[in-house]
Structure formats: structure tokens, C-alpha cells
Image (cartoon, rainbow, N blue to C red):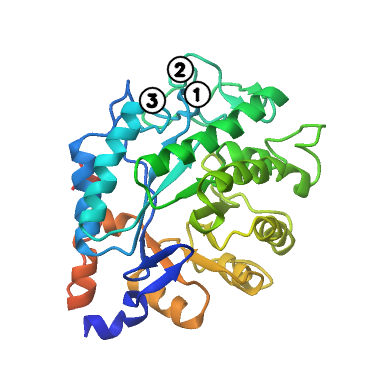
Amino acid sequence: MGMIANEALLKPVKLGAWHLRNRVVMAPMTRCFADDITGVVGEDVVEYYRKRAEDGIGLIITEGIIISPRAKGTIGVPGLYSKDQIEGWRRVTDAVHKAGGTIIAQLWHVGRLTHHEIAGGLPPQAPSAIAAKGHVHRFGKPFEKPEEMSISDIHEVIDQFALAARHAMLAGFDGVEVHGAHGYLIDQFNSDISNHRKDGYGGSLRQRLTFMKEVLQGVVQEVGAERTSIRFSALKDDQPDYMWDNPVMSIKEFLNLFRELDLSVIHPSTNHFNAKIDQGKTLHEIVQENWEGSIIGVGNLTPAKASHAIKKGTINLAAFGRPLLANSDFINKLVHGKQLTPYDSKHLSSLF
């Protein structure tokens, strides 16, 4: 019964440059198990990803990997800006590939959602000098007022994203995902709440998307459009209930940009896959109606919901987070119709 019930989810698929064993995606999840000083991952992280590859996960998207010390938003996050970090990730990708898996690196800059004590002693960076409300994860101190980025700062960060993409390929990754969602730096440029700039990086939504466009251009130049995924969202880490004023129009603006860059893989993010956001439709339904490429679905999905959405054509693949923390044998259980172990907070405390 397991294989039949989850047949849509377990079918192979071609996604961009990747030929995947099935349509199950390991969602990017911050784990905080890298060395806090060096940002290098160890053997526990190697084994964590190897287990999921050995189980048969179609596509693994790593936890967010920072592109520079200043991009850091909490303790224990890994980087891709030093030789030692590249070598650490090479051990991960070698293990995943040996197990027959496909793995891409999610590139991350938190922007204003940090504190100078975390971000290399420097103030947070953001499109405008507007502080976010809330506290730094696992660190506890309030988000600091950021420094408004100069044009020179913007170009430097664009170059850092491109270099991190190059480093990802040197580390053996099959491609990258740019984290343009959840209220982090790229999304801070996208939003009129955090972006009050008067130059070419501010103004209308189309103009505010300029930074995202230039980051993606730099990344695509390094790895190719067919090896690049982009994650975008309305929801923000510091404003989980935020929604665009005109969701359909806003989504179309994002998709037009991705189309201009010849991207074929996109990852619209929400916490609630079935939530209707405009015209009686969900985020992924609106995206699907306006996008001809591949869509990774996410948002507290169950295997049953994911299979239904794939059969309907709303999404092409389904990303799972917490279920994969609790079940390193997720695919095996789907195939054999076994019950999944429920997620528990204990699964955050170590790398199962």
C-alpha cells in the first residue's frame, strides 16, 4: 500500500540539470552544528546528510550556508567563504554522491536579522537603516539597527554570493539555491517595509527586486541557470504573518524576473501550503498558473497532501522539513507504508 499511496511522490523526475530518484526534497533547515569560530562542518554533519541520501531522498537542500562572516545570523552556522569550509563540505558531498544522492547548497545572508557580536564585530547590513523587531535566534539579544548599504556594499555582497556559488561547485555540490525568502537580506530589499531607498534599488516592487536580480545573475554566471534554484516568500522570520498587498500581482513580478534569467526551478515558501492568499487560491496555485518551469512545494506538507498536489499539477516536487529530522528513513517508510515517527523538539538537539 505504501508504494501505491505515495506513487506520485516516489516517481523519478528531471529538475533543471538534476535527474532525481523521486520528488521528495529535504527542505533547508538551520541546524547550528558547524564550528562557531571557523564555520566548518564536521563528521556529524557528513553523517546527517549521508543518511538521508542513503535512504533515497530525491534532492537535498542544505541548511543555509553563509557567504561571509557578516552574513551570519546565529551561532554554529556553516560558511562557504574559506578553504577549510569548502573542504568540510566536500566530505559531505562525497558521502551524499557515494550514496547516490543529489545535494545543492543554500546560499544565505541574514541582513538586518543579526547582532554585531554574531556578525564578525560589524553592524548588520540592510537596504535601509531600519531595525527589525525581535531577538537573534539562540543568541537572545535584540536585532540591532542595521547600517544602510552603500552601492559599494551592495556590489561587494553580490560578488560574495557569486564567489560562494563558485565555492559550492568546488566543494562538489550539484548546484545552489539562493535564499531570497523569509525576511533575510535579499527579501529585505524586496520589501517596502525594510527598503526605503531612493536609488535604483528602491521604489516600486520591480525596482526593489533589482538586488535579487543582480545576485541571481552573478550566481547563474558561476553555476548555470539549470543548476540554480531560488527560494522566495511573503512570510518573514520577524513578521510571519506578512502578506503582499496584491499577492497575484507581486508573484507575477517575481516570476517575470526569474523568467528573464532563464531559471527553471523555483521554491515558493510558506508555512501553510493550503492557505488561500488571493482570489481563493494558495501561493503555489497562483505560482503554478503563471509559471512554466518546475515548482518545489513546501508548507507543513504530509506525504498524502504532497502526492495530491503533485497529481493535481500544482507542484512538481515536495519539500519536507521536520518529518525528515525525525525520520532518517523517510523514503523507506513511504515505500513500505510504515508510520512516520512524529517530530519532537528533541530532534533539534542532535543530528539524528
Percent coordinates x, y for residue 116 in the rendering: 49, 17
Element under disc 2: loop
How far is mark 1 from mark 2, CA to CA? 6 Å
Which label number is shown at residue 139?
Answer: 3
Query: Mark 1 highlights which residue?
Result: 70
Query: Which circle's residue, 2 or 3, is located before the other in the chain?
Result: 2
Instruction: Look at label 3 and name its amino acid.
Output: Phe
**Vertical order, 338 against 1 (above or below):** above
- How far apart are the alpha carbons under marks 2 and 3? 14 Å
Instruction: Report which quarter residue 77 is drawn in.
Output: top left
Instruction: Tell me where residue 4 sits by quadrant.
Output: bottom left
- The reply to whether the C-beta atoms of the residues labelled 1 and 2 are less than 8 Å apart is yes
Q: Residue at x 47, y 64 (%)?
A: 296
Q: Is residue 125 left or right of residue 245?
A: left
Q: Tell me residue 290's x, y (percent).
A: 67, 70
Q: Residue at x 50, y 23 (%)?
A: 70
Q: Residues within 10 Å of mark 3 (few under 14, many from 20)?
A: some
3D distance between C-alphas at marks 3 and 1: 16 Å
Q: Amino acid at mark 2?
A: Gly
Please, what secondary structure does the residue beneath circle 3 have? loop
Residue 129 x/y as whole percent: 68, 24
- Frontmost of labels 3 and 1 is 1
Q: Nearer the viewer, residue 84 or 234?
A: 84
4 or 134, which lies in front? Answer: 4
What residue does disc 2 label?
120
From the top left corner, tell me how far across and down residue 14 is, in percent.
Answer: 43, 70
Q: Is residue 231 left or right of residue 96?
A: right
Instruction: Report the quarter where the N terminus lies.
Output: bottom left
Residue at 51% across, 53% down: 228
Q: Is residue 271 visible?
A: yes
